[in-house]
Image: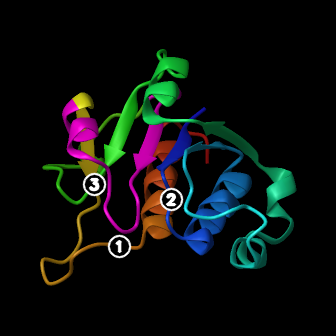
Amino acid sequence: MISIAVYKPDMPQNTASILRVCACFGIKLHIIEPCAFNINDSRFKRVVMDYINLSSIIRYESYEDFTKKNKNSRVILMTTKAEKSLFNFKFRKTDILLLGRESKGVPLYIHKDLKNKLKIPISSKTRSLNVAISASISAAEALRQIREI
């Protein structure tokens, strides 16, 4: 099943929102450490509520640990720097949608490491969507394509 990965998340509220999306769609959340917060953070708990009990979280010590343990999955970077739209891409059931940090995205070496980079088309007058909204749109489109929603 499609899953979502977040790289060193900065904001507990966004990660909690992504976790709720994962719970609602029945997909896993991969967290690439270190997080800039603890999951006992009140801001995280306020947004995640009881959805934490309805979701599956897998934590990794590093990006290298994440890639090593997910060799059989295609990792797709969701980034504003991509040329290709997620609406012009064929998703597979084992894909992992990777989202970067709210403050910095992902480092250049990850951009270079990943073949598949996609963007969500938005108005040229704007910079980007919130990471939790991007995760929601990306997951919904991937699941729609593989006929899981």
Hey, which residue is sitting farthest top in the picture? 72
| Disc assigned to residue 91 | none
Query: Residue 5: x, y in percent?
Result: 51, 44
From the image, state whether disc 1 or disc 2 is nearer to you: 2
From the image, state whether disc 2 or disc 3 is nearer to you: 2
Cβ–Cβ below 8 Å for labels 1 and 2? no
Query: Residue 25: x, y in percent?
Result: 67, 51
Ranked by sequence position, the earlier of labels 1 and 2 is 2
Query: Residue 113: x, y in percent?
Result: 25, 29
Q: Residues within 10 Å of mark 2 (few under 14, many from 20)?
A: many
* Position of 68 relative to 108 (above/below): above
How far apart marks 3 and 1 lie (CA) works out to 10 Å
Q: Which residue is mark 1?
A: 129
Q: Which residue is mark 3?
A: 79
Tell me if 38 is positioned left or right of 146 in this view: right
Indicate the amino acid at tag 2. Answer: Pro
Ranked by sequence position, the earlier of labels 3 and 1 is 3
How far apart marks 1 and 2 lie (CA) works out to 15 Å
Mark 3 element type: loop
